[in-house]
Amino acid sequence: MIVVIVGPTGVGKTKMSIELAKYLDAPVINADAVQIYKGLDIGSAKVTEDEKEGIKHYLIDIKNIDEEYSVCEYQKDVREILEEYKNKNVIICGGTGLYVSAALMDYRFYEDENSETYEEYSNEELYEMVLKKNKNSKIDKNNRVRMVRFLNKKITDTVEPKLLYPNTLFIGLTTSRDKLYARINERVDKMFNDGLVLEVKNLYNKDKTSKILNRAIGYKEVISYLNGEINEEEAKELIKKNSRHYAKRQYTWFNNKMDITWFNVDFANFNKTINEVKKYIEACNNKQNMV
C-alpha cells in the first residue's frame, strides 16, 4: 500500500508521516521540492534526525543548491523506490502536489526539454514570465495551468487522469483558515528565531545564482532583505503572506488532481487525528481484503 500524506504548509504532515511509518513499518518518501536540497533546513521546516525516529527517509538532501532537479527526475526516483518496496507499505509525504501527481499518475515527459514546478510563483509573477517569453501571448493571466504548461514544455498533462498505483490512499490534513494562518505566522516567527537569516546568508554567499534559493518561499524574501531591498520585518511579513497564498494553491491542486480523504487536525490532541487516520487505513485494508 502507498499512503500519500498531503495538505497545506504547517498542518502537521511530518508528524503524521512518522506515526504512520511506524504503524505500517514503511519508509517515507519526501514530496517537498525544497527539502530535496542540502542546507535548506530552517526555511523548509525540514524533518530533523530526531524527528525521523529512525525511520528511513528518501529524497531529502540529495542535491546541492547549485544543482537542478526536475519533476521528471523526481518521477523516476520515486518509481525506482516504489519498485524496490513493491508489495510493501510506503509513505509519500509533502506539499508539492505536482511531484506527487507526476510520480503516481500517467504524466509524460520529453527528454530534451526543461521542467520547473513554478509552485512558488503567484499568477501575477507567472504572467510576467509568460510575457517575457512571448509578449504577444493570449494566455489568460488567471489560467495558471496554461501558463505553467507554456513556460514548462517538458511536462505534459496526463494522457489519462489515471492513477498508475491502484493500491494508493490519499490522505489530506486540513484545518480552518484562521487556525492555518495562525500556524503559518507562528512557524515563520520561529524560523527567524531559529536562525533563518543566517541560514540564507550562508547559502547565498555560496551561490547567488541558485535557482532554488531565488524562488523558494522563505529564501527569496530573506535575499531581498540581505540585498537591502526591504527590512527584516517586511521580509517576515512577506513570507507569511506568500505562505498563505501558497497554501491556497496547494488546496486547489490537491482537490483537483487527487481523490483525497480529508481529516480535520486536532492540534490540541494530535493523537486523536492520528488514530482517526489509522482507523481509516485499517478500514480500507479490510475492504480491499474482502474484494
Image: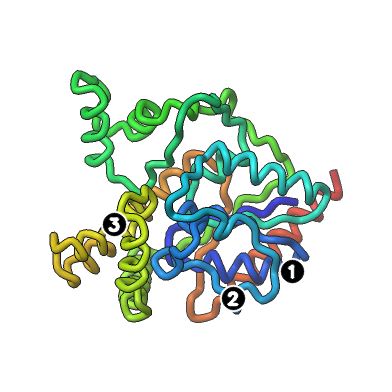
Residue sitting nearer the eye, 34 or 253: 34
Q: Nearer the viewer, residue 68 or 271?
A: 68
Q: Cα distance, mark 2 to mark 3? A: 26 Å
- Residue 254 location in percent, x, y? 49, 46
Q: Residues within 10 Å of mark 3 (few under 14, many from 20)?
A: many
Horizontal side of 235 relative to 86 (left or right) equals left
State the mark number for residue 40: none
Q: Earlier in the sequence, mark 1 or mark 3?
A: 1
Crowding around mark 2 (Cα neighbors within 10 Å: few <14, some 14 to 19, many 20+) is few
Q: Earlier in the sequence, mark 1 or mark 2?
A: 1
Name the N-terminal-most of marks 2 and 3. 2
Q: Are marks 1 and 2 in contact (CB under 8 Å)?
A: no
What is the three-letter code of the residue carrying label 3?
Answer: Lys
Q: Nearer the viewer, residue 93 or 182?
A: 93
In the displayed structure, 6 sits above or below 168; it is below
Residue holding disc 2:
51
Check disc 1 and give the amino acid type: Tyr
Residue receiving disc 1: 23
Label 3, on which residue?
220
Residue at figure coordinates x 47%, y 48% from the top left: 67
